[in-house]
Amino acid sequence: MWFFNKKNTAKKLNIIIIGAGEVGFNLAKRLSNEERQVVVIDTNEEALGKISENIDAQTLNGSGSDPLTLELAGMSNESILVAVTDSDEINILSCLFANHIAPKAQKIARIRNENFANYHTLFKGSALNIGMIVNTDQEVVHSVDRMLSLPGAVDVGEFAEGRIKMVAMVVENGPLLNQPLRQLESIVGVEAVLVAAISRNDTLIIPNGSTHIEQGDLVYFIYTEETSEDLLKAINCKKRTIEQALIIGGGNIGMRIAQFFESKKYYVKLIEKDRKRCEYLASHLEKTLILHGVGADPKLLTDENIDKADVVIAATGDEEYNILTCLLAKSLGAKETVAKINSSVYQKLSETVGVDHTINPRLAAVDTILRGMRQGKILSAMSLRGDDTEILELIALENSEITNTPIRELKMPEGVLFLAVIREDEVFIPKGGFIIKTQDRVLLLTTRKAMPELEKALASENQ
């Protein structure tokens, strides 16, 4: 049965999402919040119903790999097609037929199978013409590394090849409490530190100089490598050393984390319940000790000295199992826990019950896809908690509205904050009189609501 829901029927459809799972749902939600025209295609009526009930987007029951479905969705050269089902093959076929119908349309595909890695030239060739291939496993690995380097870090990020960093910390004490942010520079003792946002009682605040940090606030700090020690001292945070790690689950992400930990010279153990997978892991990991067993087995964890593990990472495909395993590991003495989750619903639950960190590859995929869709030269994008705000790293284009005018005089939409600018080898925390120049690397924070107007300001007049 084919159907559209009744929302947006008068609008031209220009973004077509194949797949109504977690990635498709969150992508449609964010784009809809930016007042985009979106249609979501899937064969699962229940998943489409969830979108219809919660998002201002059109839905179409069918397969994205069926040319008729794409035509019904309004596929044209002006469209953006994003194929994000759990099947790499369907995503590839969807792009193949979309390219036949609309060769000039932008096409993005989520492809996770590493065996396809050697065929990137085929994907980008004339037959498929896929502009962006999304596989966020490696980014998830780096996120784990950054999280574990800072005890207490709720979220972490890097921009400009690591020259600018972001850390989100819950501030419970220290010299920053109850002080206006205009005093931040004098308290920390260096200039290149900024508070980008504050999460208080599930409300995200974009601060100004008179904003105070209150006890229990989740604060997003922007800083540089050179100022990291001063900031971490001010928020009572010390860098940690990892020596022993235990990974539960030997899927693609678990294996990638093990490989990365091997490169860091950690002593790594990995528990996997499937014997054949254990044999595969043993042949692909050089120094990791592979254990055949169940990660939620208290006796196995105790026998493997869980109390000496600096970190336990539960990375199986079952998010509920991952959360429970982390809680068990913590009760047996593990110092830090990380749970892989697939649904944003479990994010807050994990923190509430005592899991130290979560990683969500599917939401990471959404961030990567949005970066590829943005107008202007967007280099990276990172969503903050609540999904209504994100940090963008971009190149200031010639003749764009953000260049050659003091920041205080720019007609930016409400909800936009300039965080940092890199010009050649120098990092600036821009004040109101700062002038952005063409080819400057700019870091800014924006709400979803401000995004359509901001994109116009970022685009070059020559585009």
Image (cartoon, helix red, strand yellow):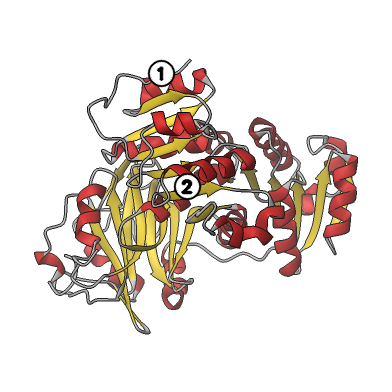
Residue at 35% from the left image edge and 47% from the top image edge: 77
- Residue nearest the observer in this picture, 456 or 167: 456
Q: Which residue is mark 2?
A: 99
Q: Which residue is mark 1?
A: 3
Residue at 28% from the left image edge and 41% from the top image edge: 34
Q: Can the viewer see residue 173?
A: no
Residue at 37% from the left image edge and 64% from the top image edge: 222
**Secondary structure found at label 2:** helix
- Badge 1, how many Cα within 10 Å: few under 14, some, many 20+? few
- Residue nearest the observer in this picture, 175 or 74: 74
Please state the horizontal and vertical placement of residue 240, each as a whole percent of the image. Answer: 62, 64
**Secondary structure found at label 1:** loop
Amino acid on which disc 1 is placed? Phe
The quadrant of the rendering that contains the C terminus is: bottom left
Q: Can the viewer see residue 274?
A: yes
Q: CA distance from mark 1 to mark 2?
A: 24 Å
